[in-house]
Image: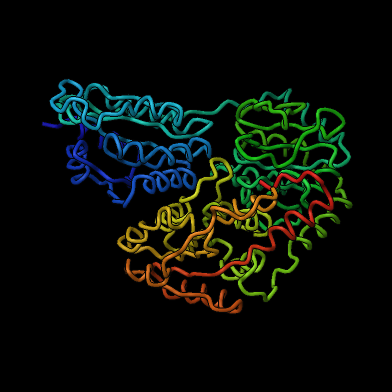
């Protein structure tokens, strides 16, 4: 006789789920047994947070929800950061947690936490399943909600007595397709008129423009219109190809070299800008550029972002329709293209400097040298994220993964593990600070157990470097940011991985190359010199803009 957990797993299979990441507990045992005899692979992680980061990254890279599993109470609460990561980052994900029986209470309040309530502000939807018969509808609805724009996490709680309940005669609900609304022709006509009337239009691609389904429409839009473009941090890599129209990435809110192009523009077409990111530029209340917002939904009006006109509907369809209206009708702005060369030249300054410990510019330069065009770099959160956002050129979409929404530490290694699982034939590199790496370093064991080909680059400064830098910028004394580290090479070897230490600036690229060539999981420990943060991101930029928000 099938039971609720069998029906639940069948519903997941019906949605195309092939992997579940997590740490099961006593309350998941029926579900675990149903998974054992299913087509779904259980990937056991060493912490629930890492499982959630992996599931979120699955959603980010595929557009289909990743699925993670935890037990009740402490296990479920360990999902919180991963849920917020997916919620702010718009990554479709399903979180499954267990619970004590709901029809009896033989253990009273032991380990009972109201997970439904705790997950509500961190997810698009949080629901408890109260009967086996409701499982097919609730699972189908969970996937629908997770994938709808704006995508995000959905939480389902499966109590153990519902999981063990008989479920005879209940079947799964077929997956259905949903067509997204398209922008009205009149809105598209108006937007095209505004763009044609502008003297120096500039395209900005934001986080919501960086969806797997939008790679071709947006790449085609750039090719058809020949409009210069830049991107936000989370919009980086949305367009395929090393276009000679690419102006750069807005890694700071103002005052950076890319803002010379923003200042020059009289019209900005903001495609998929999501104000969950730190502002890529600051809109003025009057006298600044005109802004057209192209999005799935109306823009969130903020002090720093209040568009003048909106084109609302499926972004891919809007880009196609706008491209059709504009193709062959726009003149190139030679001044903007000349400015592009100057911006990129400044970003390449000191890229091959031979100082040791290694500067951030040299690290980005050497990583780009060893990564093929389709290689995937997954960043944790730290000072190096700004340097990679500014200086690392992408040529293939979704090959630089960073988080500028929750901006949490600890996600770099799990996200790289997910990328390596999805793309075993491509080079995958996790770039982590020593602080962020240690927050989920136990997943090195998981990566080795899974037989992944993965290189982990640790940028070692024995401190929480970004906050230490901001502490110095604000004029505070150095306090509370330094720590000791293990011997990272021996630490990697203890997990069955390989380890290498960079001893000179000229060692970095060859060491990374050898790590990739050797296969398996390989950790590379490299010291970093962050003095460039102040020279470039504060002193040099303050000469251009007094109130730089280096975020």
Q: Which residue is drawn at 40% across and 54% down?
A: 440
- The vertical placement of 157 against 208, above or below, is above
Residue depicted at x 56% and y 42%: 211
Q: Is residue 356 above or below residue 239?
A: below
Q: Where does the image place residue 88, in percent across and percent down from the top left?
A: 53, 36
Residue 518 vertical position relative to residue 215 in the rendered view, above or below: below
Q: Nearer the viewer, residue 536 or 272?
A: 536
Q: Is residue 440 visible?
A: yes
Q: Residue furthest left?
A: 1
Name the foreground residue: 423 vs 260.
260
Q: Report the residue at 63% width, 66% height from top.
A: 529
Side of 369 where 165 appears, left or right: left
Quadrant of the image occupied by residue 357: bottom right
Viewer-nearest residue: 271 or 29: 29
Q: Where is residue 382 in the image (x, y as percent from the top left)?
A: 57, 53
Q: How is the model colour-coded?
A: rainbow
Residue 500 located left or right of residue 346: left
Instruction: Give the x, y percent position of residue 131.
Output: 22, 22
Residue 43 location in percent, x, y? Answer: 30, 51
Number of disc labels: 0
Q: Decide: is 49 above or below 496.
A: above
Quadrant of the image containing the N terminus: top left
- Decide if residue 376 is in sight here: no
């Amino acid at each position: 006789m099938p039971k609720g957990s069998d029906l639940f797993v069948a519903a997941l299979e019906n949605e195309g789920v092939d992997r579940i990441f997590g740490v099961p507990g006593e309350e998941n045992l029926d579900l675990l047994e149903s998974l054992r005899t299913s087509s779904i692979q259980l990937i056991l992680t060493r912490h629930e947070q890492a499982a959630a980061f992996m599931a979120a990254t699955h959603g980010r890279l595929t557009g289909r929800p990743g699925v993670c599993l935890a037990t009740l109470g402490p296990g479920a609460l360990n999902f919180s950061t991963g849920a917020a990561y997916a919620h702010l980052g718009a990554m479709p994900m399903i979180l499954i947690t267990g619970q004590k029986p709901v029809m009896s209470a033989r253990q009273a309040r032991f380990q009972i936490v109201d997970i439904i309530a705790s997950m509500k502000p961190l997810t698009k939807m949080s629901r408890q399943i109260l009967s086996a018969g409701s499982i097919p509808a609730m699972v189908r609805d969970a996937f629908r909600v997770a994938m709808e724009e704006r995508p995000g996490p959905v939480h389902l709680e499966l109590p153990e007595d519902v999981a063990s309940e008989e479920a005879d005669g209940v079947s799964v609900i077929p997956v259905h397709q949903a067509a997204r609304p398209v922008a009205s022709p009149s809105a598209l006509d108006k937007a095209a008129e505004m763009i044609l009337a502008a003297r120096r239009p500039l395209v900005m691609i934001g986080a919501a423009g960086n969806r797997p389904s939008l790679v071709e429409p947006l790449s085609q839009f750039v090719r058809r219109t020949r409009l210069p473009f830049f991107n936000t941090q989370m919009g980086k890599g949305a367009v395929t190809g090393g276009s000679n129209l690419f102006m750069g990435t807005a890694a700071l809110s103002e005052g950076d070299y890319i803002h010379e192009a923003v200042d020059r523009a009289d019209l900005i077409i903001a495609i998929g800008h999501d104000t969950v990111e730190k502002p890529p530029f600051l809109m003025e209340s009057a006298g600044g550029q005109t802004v057209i917002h192209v999005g799935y939904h109306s823009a969130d009006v903020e002090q720093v972002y209040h568009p003048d006109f909106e084109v609302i509907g499926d972004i891919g369809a809007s880009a196609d329709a706008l491209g059709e209206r504009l193709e062959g009708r726009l003149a190139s702005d030679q001044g903007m293209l000349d400015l592009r060369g100057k911006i990129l030249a400044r970003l390449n300054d000191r890229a091959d400097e031979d100082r040791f410990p290694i500067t951030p510019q040299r690290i980005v330069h050497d990583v780009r040298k060893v990564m093929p065009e389709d290689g995937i770099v997954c960043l944790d959160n730290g000072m190096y994220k700004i340097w990679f956002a500014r200086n690392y050129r992408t040529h293939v979409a979704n090959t630089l993964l960073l988080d500028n929404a929750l901006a949490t530490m600890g996600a770099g290694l799990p996200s790289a593990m997910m990328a390596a699982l999805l793309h075993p034939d491509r080079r995958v590199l996790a770039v982590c600070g020593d602080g962020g790496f240690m927050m989920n370093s136990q997943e090195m064991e998981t990566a080795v157990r899974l037989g992944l080909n993965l290189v982990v680059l640790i940028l070692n400064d024995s401190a929480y470097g970004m906050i230490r830098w901001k502490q110095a910028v604000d004029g505070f004394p150095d306090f509370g940011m330094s720590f000791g580290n293990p011997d990272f090479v021996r630490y990697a070897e203890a997990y069955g991985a390989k380890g290498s230490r960079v001893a000179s600036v000229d060692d970095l690229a060859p060491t990374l190359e050898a790590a990739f060539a050797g296969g398996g999981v390989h950790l590379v420990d490299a010291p970093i010199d962050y003095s460039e943060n102040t020279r470039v991101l504060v002193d040099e930029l303050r000469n251009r803009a007094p109130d730089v928000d280096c975020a």
